Amino acid sequence: MKKEDAEKLLHEKVEDGSTVSPVLPKGVKNYLIDIDGTITEDVPNEQPERMATCKPFPDALKTLNKWYDKGHLICFFTSRTEEHRKVTETWLNKHGFKYHSLLMGKPRGGNYHWVDNHLVKATRYNGKFTDLVEKEVTIQVFKD
């Protein structure tokens, strides 16, 4: 799905006169992908000169572009600051990453616990990108 098509898909939706969040078509995933330590070496914000010269992980490039080509939404969500947007966009484009959006300023430090009114699935990057597989795990949820 091209960036323009994704923007049309995610425009505001109105039901019964009220604006509601858009719902993606069945089977379309909205991937939030970290950059440093996930699709390339771990480059801290304190060493921005490395951001332009680091190399992508080949399996990440192949897998993410495959997901993009299958119609999924790709959003890079990074702890890099807004001042690093240009070098980040240049790097992504230089290495051929296909994506729909880039969110800067993700909180640093990890151990994320995301609370949302939408279904959220998290996959920890563990050294290589592959097709995703189903696995049962225990998670924390709110009481019913």
Image (cartoon, grey):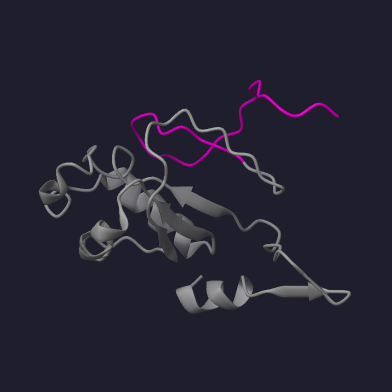
Could you say where residue 68 lies in the image, as x and y percent from the top left?
46, 61
The quarter holding residue 37 reads: top left
| Count of numbered circles on the image | 0
Could you say where residue 120 lies in the image, as x and y percent from the top left?
63, 43
- Outermost residue to the right: 16
Q: Residue at x 39, y 29 (%)?
A: 126
Q: Is residue 47 left or right of residue 92?
A: left
- Nearest the camera: 120 or 112? 112
Could you say where residue 45 lies in the image, as x and y percent from the top left?
23, 44
Residues drawn in magenta: 121-144
Q: Residue at x 47, y 28 (%)?
A: 111
Q: Is residue 3 above or below residue 71?
A: below
Is 139 part of what is drawn in magenta?
Answer: yes
Q: Main secondary structure of the magenta part?
A: loop
Is 74 part of what is drawn in magenta?
Answer: no
Q: Is residue 121 left or right of residue 14?
A: left
- Nearest the camera: 72 or 53? 53
Could you say where residue 19 lies in the image, as x and y percent from the top left?
76, 71
Q: Residue at x 69, y 64 (%)?
A: 25
Q: Is residue 55 left or right of residue 138?
A: left
Q: Is residue 98 above or below residue 13?
A: above
